[in-house]
Image (tube, rainbow, N blue to C red):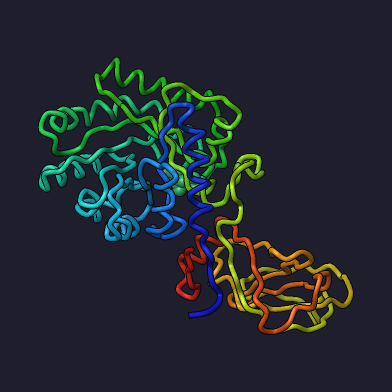
């Protein structure tokens, strides 16, 4: 197909996954690898599994189907509370899902019994990030409500079992995971066990942002599961924004082709209104600069950003289909037809994997 293309180094992803699973194992934590940024790419999922994750998780059913149809036999977890319209397919495709609505759990149970399968529901608790999850003071009430289903499922091995509790951090409110918050989750699970009599074997303590606690050697006993995507993909501690030593930060590279080079002033000529996206741009006058345009844009990057691999190349901005670079300080001349490489951030991986205009090359 050609350019732009996303190069995905599976060996580096495997190493990153192993780094995460080794760290987690030392604290009794098992890991599900999250494939949603890569649209459930089975090769990415396969690399995570080789790196030791116990299963794969994705927020979209269509991605779980893609993994399953590629022959992946590992446990699959739906990361987003099921849409009522997709419940029959959820039960068919995923052994487990994250949940926060009792009506949905009841319908999962009905469908699972109908299909003669067991589905495990993890009840999400909102510890303050204000995305999904029931508020902590409602957890016991809700667990009591679905407890009768739990008993049927335990005895007949069809229907819904309450696999445990889960929580999520730093997705909407930017709340950083902490030992007290995880302690609160463990305590709630303890009350469910004592006061309602459910086992709650899985306590899922968040996403990549929880790794910083483990890396510091601190953990809440009893929290035994994490769902990790971004840190495996990019090798970063998302809380400090620093690389984890021993992980790869360049498992993904975007390669795009230069289509124009020209010397231009750094400030536009004429009255400045709005750009293509309704923003009013601001420019610093740096005099005449050597610029280059590569055929890559917001349609390929979504809300994400890229960092040039080459020293002396700076991203000035992007429109739908043009990425504008300042190459004045580049070591050598940049010419039309040159292929430049960039490191995508999480948003850009998501955008590139979702864009039909970007070729994905795994190696
Ligand atoms: C996306 C997602 C994750 C994974 O988050 P990362 O930051 O990529 O590790 C975990 N849990 C839920 C519920 C998610 O939606």
Quarter of image, res 336: bottom right
Q: Is residue 233 visible?
A: yes
Q: State the residue lying farthest toward the right.
A: 287
Quarter of image, res 261: bottom right
The reply, left or right, for residue 27 in relation to residue 55 is right
The reply, left or right, for residue 92 in relation to residue 74 is left
Q: Position of residue 192 (x, y in %)?
A: 31, 21
Q: Nearer the viewer, residue 257 or 210?
A: 257
Q: Position of residue 31 (x, y in %)?
A: 42, 38
The reply, left or right, for residue 245 in relation to residue 179 is right
Q: Is residue 125 visible?
A: no
Q: Residue at x 54, y 72 (%)?
A: 5
Q: Is residue 297 above or below residue 148?
A: below
Q: Residue at x 73, y 66 (%)?
A: 310
Q: Is residue 194 above or below residue 343?
A: above
Q: Nearer the viewer, residue 339 or 314?
A: 339
């Amino acid at each position: 197909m050609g350019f732009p293309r996303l190069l995905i180094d599976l060996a580096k992803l495997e190493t990153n996954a192993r780094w995460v699973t080794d760290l987690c194992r030392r604290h009794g934590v098992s890991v599900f690898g999250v494939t949603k940024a890569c649209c459930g790419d089975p090769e990415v999922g396969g690399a995570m599994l080789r790196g030791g994750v116990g299963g794969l998780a994705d927020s979209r059913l269509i991605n779980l189907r893609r993994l399953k149809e590629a022959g992946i036999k590992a446990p699959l977890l739906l990361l987003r509370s099921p849409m009522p319209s997709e419940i029959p397919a959820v039960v068919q495709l995923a052994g487990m899902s994250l949940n926060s609505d009792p009506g949905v759990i009841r319908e999962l149970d009905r469908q699972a019994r109908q299909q003669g399968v067991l589905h495990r529901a993890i009840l999400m608790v909102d510890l303050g990030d204000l995305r999904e999850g029931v508020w902590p003071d409602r957890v016991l009430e809700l667990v009591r409500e679905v407890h009768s289903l739990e008993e049927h499922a335990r005895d007949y091995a069809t229907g819904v079992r309450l696999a445990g509790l889960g929580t999520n951090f730093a997705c909407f409110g930017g709340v950083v995971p902490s030992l007290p918050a995880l302690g609160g989750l463990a305590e709630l699970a303890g009350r469910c066990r004592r006061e309602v009599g459910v086992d709650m074997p899985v306590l899922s303590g968040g996403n990549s942002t929880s790794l910083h606690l483990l890396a510091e050697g601190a953990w809440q006993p009893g929290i035994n599961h994490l769902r990790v995507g971004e840190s495996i993909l990019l090798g970063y501690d998302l809380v400090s924004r620093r690389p984890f030593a021993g992980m790869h930060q360049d498992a993904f590279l975007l390669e795009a082709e230069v289509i124009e080079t020209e010397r231009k002033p750094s400030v536009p000529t004429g009255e400045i209104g709005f750009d293509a996206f309704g923003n009013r741009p601001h420019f610093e006058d740096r005099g005449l600069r050597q610029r280059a345009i590569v055929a890559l844009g917001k349609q390929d990057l979504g809300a994400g950003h890229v960092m040039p691999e080459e020293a002396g190349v700076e991203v000035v901005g992007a429109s739908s289909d043009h990425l504008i670079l300042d190459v004045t300080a580049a070591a050598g001349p940049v010419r039309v037809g040159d292929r430049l490489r960039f490191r995508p951030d999480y948003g850009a991986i998501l955008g590139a994997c979702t864009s039909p205009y970007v070729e994905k090359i795994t190696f």
